[in-house]
Image: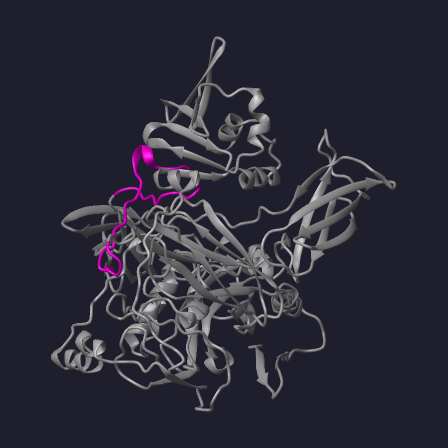
Amino acid sequence: MRIIFMFKSNRCIALYICFIYPVYLSASDNALQKLTTFAKHFATFANNYPQEKVYLHFDNISYYQGENIWFKVYIVTAEQNALTRLSKTLYVELLTPEGNVLESKKLKIENGQCHGEFALRDTMPSGFYEVRAYTRCMLNFGNDAAFSRVFPLFEKPLKAGHYESRKIRERYGYLKVPGPRADYSQKGSLNVSFFPEGGNLIAGVKSKVAFKATGHEGENALVEGAVYDAQGVKVAEFSNEYNGMGTFEFTPGFGKYTAKVQSNKSSYSFDLPQAMPSGYAFSVDNTSDENMDIRIQKSDGLAPDSLGLTLACRGKVYVFDEEYLSTGNSLLVTIPKRLLPTGVIQISLFNTHGEVLCERLAFVDHHSQMKMNVIQNKSQYQPFEKVDMDFQVNDNRGIPVETTFSVAVRDAATTSGDIYADNVLTNLLLSSEVKGYIENPGYYFESNEPSRKAALDLLLLTQGWSRYAWKQMAGVTPFVVRHPIEKSLLIEGRVLSSFRKKQKENVDVSMTLMKDSLSQRGTCVTDKEGKFNLALEDFQGKAELILQTKEKGKRKENYILLDRVFSPEVKPYSYFEKQIPNITPIKITNDTASVLTDTIPSKKASREVRIPIDKKSHLLKEVTVKGKKEMTLEDEVLPYANIVYDVEKTVDQNLDKNTEEPTNIVDFLLQTNPYFSSTQYGDSMVYTYKQSRTGFFLNNVLVMRIRSWMSPIFRLIKTLITRQISTFFICSSL
């Protein structure tokens, strides 16, 4: 056995490869060199292409129209979960239920942290909104790398403070607006998916198979059933163990296997994955606190071969082992857990060609979390009363730790107390390491009971395909860097010829950025692909950008395409993300009521208090000033709108995608809204929205046709409002 051992020193963690073999080269040595090459490439990948993760700490778990979403952000490097020193710009986006980006923020990262907020306007429709966050370089590793959180936005209470009213009215039918978010889809009212441990069933090799049962909307389903071979012989039985998940074992042969399932008094039938005629399989025993046992098995008749085994956590290899099944078809490998850190462990078995034969995830927990004690000066407080709290943070050895952290304080009577919700611990160690949404991740960390360990292992068997692609990290398949590590705000783009849109090399690009009385200037020369980039100094808010091109010292008009379209793909919501959290109000006891009575002075007593005239400050009685707010056109129509476009912004986004610039409002709608269409009838044009005739209003004046003379007006339009109830398009030059 040849293992990479991890040794700790005071200042660093180093990896040393210990090999013992003869000086002469043999087939075994050649195989070892190939396997070692993959392991070394994997080990250096994290240094060459460091990954970052983002966690947002929010002030609440749900919101009402008119409130603010406040958040604190922690950006860490994946390998150590330590605050990053790499990226300096964070992108945070607020998405509508349909998946349209409602607002986007660029935040400056300092010492791996930043903060911000989103204002939820009263005119925003209620529904489930998504907040997602990412650094630019995170997008190199797929859509699942970005942080995502879904919040319910409730309608504003009719009476202030009546937060027990939590209404959501989702838009259906003809009121539904276009957007990229797909609905969750599943064939049939029940689905059962099967996941062989290691990835494949091998004929003649006993295997553990995990399963996940979901209902029509993706909810957990209770099932029980049995597995039958092609002759109808029962080979295994199974039932749920936790959250629709479970396992069973059997030895597959050649042929088809079918699972017959009972759920909610109905019968279903599902096919299992086809068993491979030969190959490797492994099983992992992770129940011990000291060691992890990995049993590697191969099918009969398969020639012995040198295999590599890597154990990695957060993209870093901690163990590499060469395996060779010289005798027999089974080999047990024991890995001391002290070699592994706390977190999700990616276990991969591969051959000399770089083919992954088996792979699965397991979790190691050394219970090394920091401990926090909170001491407050009172157990109960009055509204707006000052709260004093002391925090003591210690590491797992009890040594005090000096650090920064954020605290969200909510009213316990009107908010959920779900102890199993995702938090910074569960997110950095678990949720950000696997694909898909995890229901109640805190459940797996609440205790060290065997049942919790078994449930976590089930989760990693059924949902545990890692965000870290082994073949890319081992150098088997190429890794293409499409997004840079942004050390500052950047302006990137390409220069293309005006007519043929071909990339142009050696073009001088000059930039002028103007904001108030301040300006920034810079120059750059395009490369072979016509690309350029310019770094900016920090500024807040919006600024006007002017880009000019020169060729051979003379100004020349070219087509400039800015690289600003790089958001992740919009994901469909899972069933659990659209569940409104439960609220358990606190009951006011007699003891509590007496405390409230004793501490709040009565109105009668307050009137009898007289303030001396020689006192410098006087608190006057509250005065309510009533007046009618002057309404703008935007204020009047927004509450009735179903779709609102910032035309200027949307046109810029479409230009970034290399689409043609619209010349009038009809072109804009045809380009942007798939529900809008136009049809020529003789000399007239008929416009429809969802197959209904439409009318246009420009500044409250009905316009029957959109002609070319509207092009100058279009450039002044800031907001386009679609009112679908009466199928009117209302345009205003606000």
The answer to whether residue 353 is seen in the rendering is: yes
Name the spot of residue 645 as percent of width and height, x first. Answer: 47, 39
Outermost residue toward the right in this view: 552
The answer to whether residue 304 is seen in the rendering is: no
Name the spot of residue 509 as percent of width and height, x first. Answer: 77, 46
Res. 724 image quadrant: top left
| Residue 181 counted in the magenta span | yes
Outermost residue toward the front in this view: 613
Name the spot of residue 669 as percent of width and height, x first. Answer: 49, 30
Q: Residue at x 60, y 88 (%)?
A: 10
User: In front: 47, or 588?
Assistant: 588
Q: Is residue 529 left or right of residue 254?
A: right
Q: Is residue 481 left or right of residue 71?
A: right
State which region is magenta: 159-188
Q: Is residue 210 above or below residue 404?
A: above
Q: Is residue 37 above or below residue 501?
A: below
Q: Main secondary structure of the magenta part?
A: loop
How does the figure colour the protein chain or chains?
one colour
| Residue 171 counted in the magenta span | yes
Q: Is residue 48 above or below residue 713?
A: below
Q: Residue at x 37, y 23 (%)?
A: 691
Q: Residue at x 68, y 51 (%)?
A: 514
Name the spot of residue 611 as percent of width and height, x first. Answer: 30, 80
User: In front: 450, or 248?
Assistant: 450
Q: Is residue 407 left or right of residue 565?
A: left
User: Where, quadrant-wise, is the N terminus in this rendering?
Assistant: bottom right
- All told, the count of numbered labels is 0
User: In front: 313, or 426?
Assistant: 426
Res. 246 image quadrant: bottom left
Outermost residue toward the top in this view: 682
User: In front: 371, or 430?
Assistant: 371
